[in-house]
Every structure is written in C-alpha cells, then in structure tokens.
Image (tube, rainbow, N blue to C red):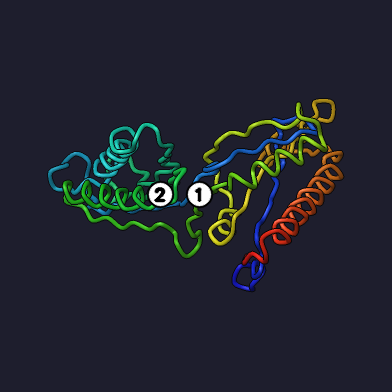
C-alpha cells in the first residue's frame, strides 16, 4: 500500500485492533512505544558427524549449538538495559535422530523482539556474532539468516502523543470516560508501524470481550469468537475520530494558514 502511494498527502493515520481482554464498548490506547519491533531468525551449526563412542574424532554440532543458545540468553540479561524491553526466544531445535551418532549439523531458530527499532537491529547484530563465535570456539561453521526476504523485520509501533490524546478525548465523548482505558505495552509485532515511519499515527485497542458469547479468546486462538456488537461501535468511533481530527485541522489552518502534511 505504501509503494502504491496510499499515504501520499495523508497527515495522520488511526488504526484499531480488537482486544479480547476489554469488554465490548470500551477502548484503550497508549502513547509512545507500544508494540515491539520483530524479526525471525534461523541458524545452522555444522560440525562433523561420527560415532558417539569416540567424540574426539567428531566435531560436535550439538554441543556448539547448546553453548550458542545459552550464550544468547545473556544478550538480554547482561547486555540490554533493564529499563528496556527485549525478547529472544529460541522456538525450535532440529538435529539428528540416532542414539549413538553425533549429527553433522543442527538447525535452530526463533524470534527477536524489542520495543525500539534500534534495539532490534543491535540484537540482530549480536545474535549473529554470538552464534558465529560459539561455532568457531567449537570448531564448527555457522550459517545465520534473519529471514529478511520471507519475513522482513517489523519496526516498533510508536504512537503519536497528540493523536493518542485525540483518541482518548473522542472515545470519552462517545463511550464515556469510564470506558476509555490506558493501554499497555506488548511484545507482539504490528505492521501498522510501517505507516508510522512516514506519518504520525496511533493504533488502539477496542474491546470485544463477552463471556456469555464465549468472546474471551485472542485472535490467534482456534476458539476465537467475536462479539459483533463491536462492529457498529468501531465503525462509528473510527468515523468520529477522523471527522473530529479534520475539523480541528481545518480550524487550525484557518487561524494559522495552510499546514503541509
């Protein structure tokens, strides 16, 4: 959409995402960093296969992989500022299947996440260095990919403070102040962040929780079910937020002259 010029001449962008933890008829938003920058990675550590009874004749890719995975955990606990939020999760490890032969290689991978885009780039660099370093220590070769072609890294969501206040104000007028909550930072990724790299934007949560209907599961759950009462609420809220924003913009331009988008 960005490549096709969908944001040309656009001054601001608003988005909403259903929230199964908020009751239908309520919203939540958070200013500043709110969703993590995210990427995936995969690695392969290659050694030399051989009989497990004579380990001195082999180059053990399992041991090298074990050290690499443990060493990567220190990137969060010992290199990252404790006030920051980062995640490094190894989600799979695949090696040999024999009980008495070391495998020629081990493959593993997972996900990296940071509440700042710069933090993700630093984490990517250090993961590569650690895996390559541990492989070298154990006389193995390492191959690392950040899956840039298949799954380009998402930047972090950075909600604009002024637009956040606008959403809170219009939400309070439409839904009542008690139904407008302060949101939370989460380590999930969101491609809305690509828009925010170009123009100010805010994405907020809209509640759809309804225990009677069973609408209490996340959008990634096989039991996900939506309370359809959220649909007219969301449509009306989106319209009101956009209309009020344009009215305020026109008033400002009337007082100060045209403002470039």
Give residue 6's position: percent from left, percent from top: 67, 69
As rendered, which of 92 and 50 lies closer to the eye?
A: 92
- Considering the numbered disc 2 on the image, is that residue within a helix, a strand or a loop? helix
Image quarter of the N terminus: bottom right
Give residue 250's position: percent from left, percent from top: 75, 59
Give residue 195's position: percent from left, percent from top: 59, 59
For image coordinates 49% across by 60% down, the residue present is: 152
For image coordinates 67% across by 66% down, the residue present is: 258
What residue would you read off at disc 1?
156
As rendered, which of 26 and 246 lies closer to the eye?
A: 246
As rendered, which of 254 and 90 lies closer to the eye?
A: 254
Q: Do the residues labelled 2 and 1 touch (CB within 8 Å)?
A: yes
Q: Quadrant of residue 25?
A: top right
Q: In this view, does 257 lie to the left or right of 193?
A: right
As rendered, which of 200 and 215 lies closer to the eye?
A: 200
Query: Is tag 2's residue or tag 1's residue first in the polypeptide sequence?
Result: 2
For image coordinates 44% across by 46% down, the residue present is: 116
Give residue 30's position: percent from left, percent from top: 60, 38
Q: Residue 67 carries which label?
A: none
Image quarter of the C terminus: bottom right
- Considering the numbered disc 1 on the image, is that residue within a helix, a strand or a loop? loop
Give neighbour class at mark 1: few <14, some 14-19, many 20+ (Cα, 10 Å): many
Q: In this view, does 242 lie to the left or right of 55?
A: right
Q: In this view, does 162 lie to the left or right of 212?
A: left
What residue would you read off at disc 2?
120
């Amino acid at each position: 959409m960005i490549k096709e010029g969908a944001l040309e001449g656009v001054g601001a962008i608003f988005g909403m995402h259903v929230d199964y933890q908020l009751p239908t008829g309520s919203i939540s938003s958070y200013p500043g960093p709110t969703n993590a920058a995210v990427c995936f990675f995969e690695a392969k550590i290659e050694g030399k296969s051989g009989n497990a009874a004579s380990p001195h004749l082999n180059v053990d890719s399992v041991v090298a992989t074990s050290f690499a995975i443990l060493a990567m955990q220190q990137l969060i606990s010992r290199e990252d500022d404790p006030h920051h939020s980062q995640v490094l999760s190894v989600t799979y490890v695949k090696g040999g299947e024999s009980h008495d032969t070391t495998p020629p290689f081990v493959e593993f991978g997972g996900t990296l996440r940071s509440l700042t885009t710069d933090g993700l780039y630093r984490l990517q660099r250090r993961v590569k260095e650690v895996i390559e370093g541990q492989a070298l220590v154990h006389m193995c070769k390492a191959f690392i990919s950040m899956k840039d072609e298949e799954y380009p890294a998402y930047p972090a969501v950075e909600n604009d403070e002024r637009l956040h206040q606008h959403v809170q104000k219009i939400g309070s007028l439409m839904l009542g102040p008690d139904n407008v909550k302060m949101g939370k930072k989460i380590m999930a990724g969101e491609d809305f962040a690509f828009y925010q790299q170009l123009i100010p934007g805010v994405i907020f949560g809209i509640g759809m929780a309804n225990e009677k209907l069973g609408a209490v599961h996340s959008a990634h759950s096989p039991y996900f079910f939506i309370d359809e009462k959220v649909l007219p609420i969301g449509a009306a809220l989106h319209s009101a937020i956009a209309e009020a924003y344009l009215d305020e913009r026109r008033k400002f331009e009337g007082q100060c002259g045209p403002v470039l988008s």
